[in-house]
Image (cartoon, helix red, strand yellow):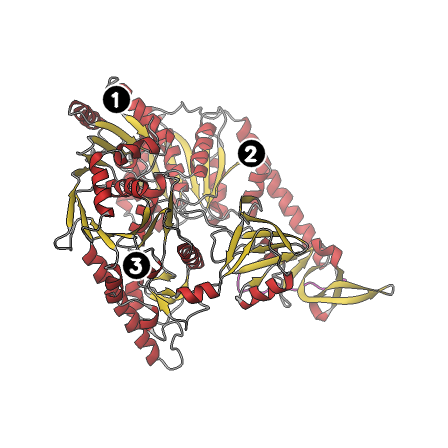
């Protein structure tokens, strides 16, 4: 197995690469062109040159996504001597210049702080794109004046530091989880500066700074120690009226610009500036809604002309497919993109053997051990003499290098999987918000007291108890009856949760109403529990069908998934298959958010059942969902001999009659449908697996019919929002539970924004998403 260090040494030890390095450092030329680079060869070449010659390199990509892929390639190559940076745009959307992304503001502040302290002998690569570049940044003088530096062993006065942080618009909190926050607990001060991607913890002995550590706000564990720190405020919002400049002015004089398609970038910058001016004019026309942020587009944004004139002061290297510079020094590095094999492994092996015959070294790039192992097994079966080295890195595109005579093929292109760049891990505020949520109870909110029923929260009040003042919770019940609850009995009160938009009936103090309600509910719960426990006991004792272990076809299906499994998704798949291989019926609940990969787990389970000649029923709550699942199952199983059909109210009576006949005779392997599939006229010939999507959306009648259907059948329930009863039974062990909590890589959170109707906003939003 190769490692990235050995792989890169093939390049920076090559004589032609050394010639390129020497030419770039000479003063004979200002503009250069690297032609012929395909796939990820461009970033491999850049990493090799940066390691060889040092200096500061800036890579300018077409857009945010491409920049992220280039950055991901460089990060995968793992060159410790090179400091990598991704300089992002401030705003969440390029068409909406008011809502900023705090993580991006933080990243920009962090990089600007590093640029002011960059030393010439360091090697660094900064990747950026037009949207990020056309936003001007705070000038050097203002940034220097508004940066507070602190070293280990220096003395600092806590009240002074607190006052300074308030001046910088930092928010004082119980604990920090977001940039622009600080917390003081005695001699420990936590600060989340805009100069670092993680918060800092200062420990004082008296007034002396005894230790400075970077820490993870989720685990509270230290990541590294520092001898000096810089506290920088939010340079995007705090200094809007300060003089601004291009970020290029922060670069060292001997920096080298790598631009992908110069003309495209130039046009993009001019278009962005034009859009900013247009939006500014529209807002100015609307009375009272002129945006402070867009008060002077020329002050805040680069026209494109300034960028071009500043860029000309540095050495420029063009790469890509379209070249702009005239009379530039040209380097030809002939490469070809990785060929497509359409998952035909005979064709792949034949190609690799041909490469060997022509003197090329075969390298397979994959950071997924399972995929590497699988390819090794395939090569071993088809041609045991084949030599192919594995390289444990993930790059965006494979290539054939005709200079060094090597081929780099990626596993995701071989298997036709979707390849996604890997983002940096950022601090999560989900765990940190828990303490805030405890304070969320507002006067007027409905609450439930376990002993007295439903009332309204009326705040905290100090009451006199035996001559001593104590804090108590004030609750108001029906007819304005008051109840004071000692603060120590807080555990007896919970916020009322019911149907949104409806108010509950308030309880009357001193009546038996609440006790009667509790008795009634307890009685019903006992009945339900008795029925369910009897059912689960019956299922556990019943002899179910024991499925065989994974076949070759099962492995083929799972490897054809175009995305990479998340750890939770892979674990859920293993749990389901293990349950199916047991002698009693499976009853497993898979809980995961929308888009986390529950359906893929169901497809794999269904295919496992069909492999053992069993039929599968997929029950869904809506007609649209039935159609969606049908399309998904059909698409995933199209290469396999599996018959998939669906029933919903959009199918004609003739179609339904034909489908039922084929289901009853066993011709259809997988039937997807709404509650229609539990009707008595559908008699599966040999039903082996029942998949229920969002069980809580079905009525009592359907659930009664399901009870009869599911006694000897394996049941897999999928849900994003389990009802308390289902979840409780899973947690107490009456049914098995798998949780898919990890989102797919770089899954973006859903953001909701409200606008008055504007066609250009809709158009730009859709174009941005596409």
Q: Point out residue 274 in the picture as x, y percentages from the top left corner.
A: 25, 69
Find the distance from the CA under tag 1 to the CA under tag 3.
45 Å
Whether 191 is drawn above or below 375: the answer is: below
- Which sits earlier in the primary sequence, circle 3 or circle 2? 2
Secondary structure under the numbered disc 2 in the rendered image: helix
Q: Residue furthest left?
A: 327
Q: Point out residue 566 in the picture as x, y percentages from the top left corner.
A: 41, 39
Q: Which residue is mark 2?
A: 536
- Residue 768 has which mark? 3
What residue is at 68 percent from the left and 55 percent from the top?
206
Magenta stretch: give its range.
Answer: 498-510
Find the distance from the CA under tag 1 to the CA under tag 2.
54 Å
- Residue 387 has which mark? 1
| Of marks 1 and 3, the one in the foreground | 1
Q: Is residue 313 magenta?
A: no
State the count of labels: 3
Secondary structure under the numbered disc 1 in the rendered image: loop
Secondary structure under the numbered disc 3 in the rendered image: helix
Tell me if label 1 and label 2 are in contact, CB under 8 Å. Answer: no
Is residue 509 shown to the viewer in this render?
no
């Amino acid at each position: 197995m190769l490692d990235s260090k050995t792989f890169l040494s093939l390049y920076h030890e090559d004589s032609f690469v050394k010639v390129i390095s020497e030419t770039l450092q000479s003063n004979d030329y200002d503009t250069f062109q690297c032609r012929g680079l395909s796939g990820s060869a461009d970033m491999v070449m850049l990493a090799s040159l940066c390691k060889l010659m040092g200096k500061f390199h800036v890579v300018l990509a077409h857009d945010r996504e491409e920049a992220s892929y280039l950055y991901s390639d460089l990060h995968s190559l793992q060159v410790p001597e090179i400091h990598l940076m991704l300089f992002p745009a401030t705003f969440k959307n390029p068409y909406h210049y008011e809502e900023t992304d705090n993580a991006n503001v933080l990243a920009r502040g962090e990089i600007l702080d590093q640029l002011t302290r960059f030393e010439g002998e360091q090697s660094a690569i900064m990747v950026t794109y037009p949207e990020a570049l056309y936003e001007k940044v705070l000038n050097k003088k203002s940034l220097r004046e508004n940066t507070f530096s602190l070293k280990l062993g220096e003395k600092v006065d806590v009240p002074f530091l607190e006052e300074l942080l308030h001046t910088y618009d930092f928010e004082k909190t119980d604990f920090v989880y977001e940039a622009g926050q600080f917390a003081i607990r005695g001699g420990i001060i936590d600060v989340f500066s805009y100069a670092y991607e993680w918060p800092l913890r200062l420990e004082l002995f008296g007034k002396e700074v005894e230790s400075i550590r970077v820490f993870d706000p989720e685990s509270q564990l230290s990541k590294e120690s520092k001898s000096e720190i810089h506290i920088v405020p939010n340079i995007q919002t705090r200094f809007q009226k300060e003089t601004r400049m291009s970020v290029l002015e922060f670069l060292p004089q001997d920096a080298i610009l790598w631009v992908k398609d110069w003309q495209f970038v130039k046009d993009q910058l001019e278009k962005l500036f034009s859009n900013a001016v247009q939006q500014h004019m529209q807002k100015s026309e609307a009375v009272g809604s002129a945006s402070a942020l867009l008060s002077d587009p020329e002050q805040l944004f680069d026209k494109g002309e300034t960028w071009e004139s500043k860029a000309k002061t540095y050495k420029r290297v063009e790469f890509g497919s379209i070249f702009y510079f005239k009379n530039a020094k040209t380097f030809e590095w002939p490469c070809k993109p990785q060929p497509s094999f359409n998952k035909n492994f005979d064709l792949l092996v034949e190609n690799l053997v041909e490469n060997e015959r022509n003197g090329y070294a075969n390298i397979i790039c994959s950071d997924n051990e399972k995929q590497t192992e699988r390819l090794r097994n395939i090569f071993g079966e088809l041609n045991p003499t084949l030599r192919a080295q594995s390289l444990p890195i993930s790059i965006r595109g494979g290539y054939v290098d005709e200079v060094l005579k090597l081929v780099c093929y990626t596993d995701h292109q071989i298997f036709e999987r979707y390849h996604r760049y890997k983002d940096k891990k950022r601090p999560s505020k989900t765990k940190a918000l828990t303490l805030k949520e405890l304070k969320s109870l507002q006067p007027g909110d409905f609450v439930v007291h376990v002993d007295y029923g439903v009332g309204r929260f009326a705040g905290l009040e100090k009451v006199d108890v035996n001559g001593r003042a104590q804090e108590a919770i004030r609750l108001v019940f029906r007819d304005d009856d008051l109840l004071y609850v000692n603060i120590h009995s807080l555990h007896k009160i919970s916020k009322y949760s019911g149907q949104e938009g409806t108010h509950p009936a308030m309880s009357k103090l001193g009546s038996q109403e609440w006790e009667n309600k509790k008795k009634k509910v307890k009685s019903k719960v006992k009945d339900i529990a008795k029925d369910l426990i009897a059912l689960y006991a019956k299922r556990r004792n019943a002899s179910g069908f024991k499925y065989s272990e994974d076949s070759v076809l099962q492995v083929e299906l799972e490897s054809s998934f175009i995305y990479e499994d998340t750890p939770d998704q892979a674990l859920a798949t293993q749990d389901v298959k293990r349950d199916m291989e047991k002698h009693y019926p499976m009853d497993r609940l898979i809980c995961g958010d929308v888009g986390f990969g529950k359906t893929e787990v169901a497809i794999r389970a269904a295919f496992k059942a069909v492999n053992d000649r069993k039929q599968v029923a997929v029950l869904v709550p809506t007609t649209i969902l039935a159609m969606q699942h049908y399309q998904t199952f059909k698409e995933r199983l199209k290469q396999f001999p599996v018959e998939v059909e669906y029933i919903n109210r959009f199918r004609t009576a003739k179609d339904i009659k034909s489908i039922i006949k084929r289901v009853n005779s066993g011709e259809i392997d997988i039937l997807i449908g709404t509650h229609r599939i539990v009707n008595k006229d559908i008699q599966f010939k040999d039903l082996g697996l029942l998949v229920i999507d969002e069980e809580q959306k079905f009525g009592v009648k359907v659930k009664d019919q399901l009870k009869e259907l599911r006694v000897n059948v394996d049941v897999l329930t999928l849900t994003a929002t389990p009802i308390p009863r289902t979840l409780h039974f899973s947690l107490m062990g009456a049914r098995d539970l798998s949780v898919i909590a990890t989102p797919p890589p770089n899954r973006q959170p859903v953001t909701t924004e409200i606008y008055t109707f504007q066609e250009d906003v809709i158009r730009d939003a859709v174009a941005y998403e596409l």
